Amino acid sequence: MTPAAAKTAIGLDAAAAREAFYRLLGLLIVSLFPALFWTTVAAVGASALGAPLSPLALATIGAAIAAFLAAVFNQLFARI
């Protein structure tokens, strides 16, 4: 038999895991979609100007945007 306190702790761990999953999902949505959008804008803009960017440059731009947005999102919604 499992004591009631242990059952409560197990329930809290499951709730914390669900919350962590939703926080990660929100972080991905908030950081990846805008990063993909602005990377596409940069690629199209550079191609329109006649100097297309290399795939490495586009990956660097996308990673930098995603990392910045993830850091901002994490700090805005971090629990103190």
Image (cartoon, grey):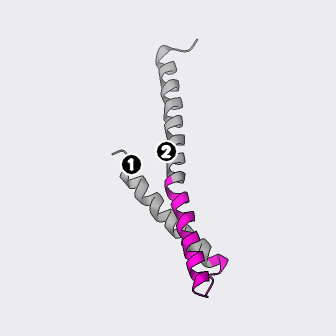
Residue that extends furthest to the top in the rendered view of this protein: 1
In the image, 47 versus 22, the foreground residue is: 47
Q: Helix, strand, or loop for circle 2?
A: helix
Percent of width and height locating residue 31: 51, 58
Q: In which quarter of the image is the N terminus?
A: top right
Q: Is residue 47 magenta?
A: yes
Residue position marked by numbered label 2 in the rendering? 23
| Image point (55%, 15%), residue name | 2
Q: Is residue 25 above or below residue 6?
A: below
| Image point (52%, 25%), residue name | 10
Give the total of numbered labels. Answer: 2
Q: Quadrant of residue 53?
A: bottom right
Residue that extends furthest to the right in the rendered view of this protein: 55
Q: Residues within 10 Å of mark 2 (few under 14, many from 20)?
A: some
Q: Helix, strand, or loop for circle 1?
A: loop
Q: Quadrant of the C terminus?
A: top left
**Dominant secondary structure, magenta:** helix
- Name the amino acid, label 2: Arg
Give the CA distance from mark 1 to mark 2: 9 Å
Q: How crowded is mark 1: few (under 14 residues within 10 Å), some or many (20 or more)?
A: few
Percent of width and height locating residue 6: 50, 20
| Image point (50%, 63%), residue name | 67
Percent of width and height locating residue 9: 48, 25
Percent of width and height locating residue 38: 52, 68
Residue position marked by numbered label 1 in the rendering? 77
Residue that extends furthest to the front in the rendered view of this protein: 48
Magenta highlight range: 30-56
In the image, 36 versus 11, the foreground residue is: 36
Q: Is residue 14 above or below residue 26?
A: above
In the image, 37 versus 17, the foreground residue is: 37
